[in-house]
Amino acid sequence: MGNYRIAVLPGDGIGKEVTKGAVEILQAVATRFHHQFEFVYGLIGGEAIDQKGTPLPDETLAMCRQSDAVLLGAVGGPKWDQNPPHLRPEKGLLAIRKEMNLFANLRPVKFYDSLIDSSPLKAEVIQDVDLLIVRELTGGLYFGKPSGRHVEDGEETVVDTLLYKREEIKRIVTTAFELARKRRKKVTSVDKANVLESSRMWREIAEEVARDFPDVKLEHMLVDNAAMQLIRNPKQFDVLVTENMFGDILSDEASMLAGSLGMLPSASLSTSGPSLYEPIHGSAPDIAGQNKANPIAMILSSAMMLRLSFGLHEEAKAIEKAVQQVLTSGYRTADVARNGQRIVSTKEMVNEIKATI
Ligand code: ATP
Ligand code: MG
């Protein structure tokens, strides 16, 4: 029996709906396994801009730092798209990652047999896919300075900077190797070393780190080739490690191996302090407030939280098994339903998973 304090940041759009579902699932787990989960709620994103005038209020950050783990829904929506840069919901997301040093974003991509018809890819390509994308989360193009618009030689000019320090690359690659050691012992380091200096240094460091992991195989792959290989033969991959933006793009692509963006969870690990768990999808304004969103990515994110932050392996497994069982029984939200399958709402899906737990 354990006591855990969980900071919950529902955010905007479907973030609110799927977070509510995940909290209900965690409450069911607490009851079954006799734990105490204390949920404390905070504002982030568009809702925080509306209520507090900033996408990441200080009190939200303080609350997260004083918790054992953070659960985050998603931020953003058309309402705030025209806001100036410092009043955009996404700023809140980038700020919490940076402020909490959430440098390593783990995105497992697992194929569920029962969703075979939900992927546009052939069964023989995706069956048994089990890979892990390790995305660097606090550097690269998203944070590098200079960044912005100016006039140069009378011409409107714009710049973003792909910036990394040696230690930042070393720690993310090391994390990937440590994770690969517990899996199938292969790391694919993804870069664009034929063009980018940052990628050349990334490759050097990956080689250096690899010397400390003689039992793990390292291969390098150019990002354009990796994008292609993910569709051609995803089973060749165990752990992929890459910089921030490459990781963002490749993981949305990889989500189709699992059938939908609404299926993929993620964990963001910190150099120090609590980790953060969120689905890889965004706030999905097109379906927000309609009780349609697939809550599974968020629910699986909470299972990752139980395992990685609290060491509650049985409990995490109970959630994952319940998800698998419910999918096998034929329950489908709209995003993964195919040809005439009955579609359930977000709430029905949550209730079914809860009942199974
Ligand atoms: P972000 O920039 O925050 O990653 P995005 O532009 O990638 O956001 P999403 O909000 O992830 O966009 O939505 C992309 C598409 O996937 C939308 O059509 C959305 O409806 C769909 N989608 C995303 N998440 C889910 C979900 N949980 N269930 C069903 N559909 C989803
Ligand atoms: Mg996206």
Image (tube, helix red, strand yellow):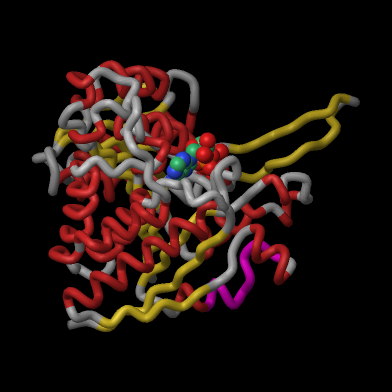
Q: Is residue 162 left or right of residue 274?
A: right
Q: Residue at x 25, y 25 (%)?
A: 234
> In the image, is 87 to the left or to the right of 309?
right
Q: Nearer the viewer, residue 136 or 42?
A: 42
37 relative to 342, above or below: below
Q: Residue at x 30, y 20 (%)?
A: 121
Whether residue 167 appears in this view of the structure is no
- Image-based side of 304 in relation to 181, left or right: right
In the picture, residue 19 is in which quadrant? bottom left
Q: Quadrant of residue 36?
A: bottom left
Q: Which residues are magenta?
A: 54-62
Q: Is residue 113 above or below residue 102?
A: above
Can you say which quadrant of the picture contains the N terminus?
bottom left
Residue located at (13% from left, 64% from top): 314
Q: Is residue 26 magenta?
A: no
User: Depth check: 357 or 259 in front?
Assistant: 357
Instruction: Pick the quarter of the image with the C terminus.
Output: bottom left
The answer to whether residue 322 shows anywhere in this view is yes
Q: Looking at this view, is 278 or 328 the one in front? A: 328
| Image position, residue 211 (x, y; %) | 18, 40
Residue 313: x %, y % from top left: 15, 63
Query: Which x, y percent locates residue 206?
Result: 30, 37
Q: Residue at x 23, y 77 (%)?
A: 31
Q: Is residue 59 magenta?
A: yes
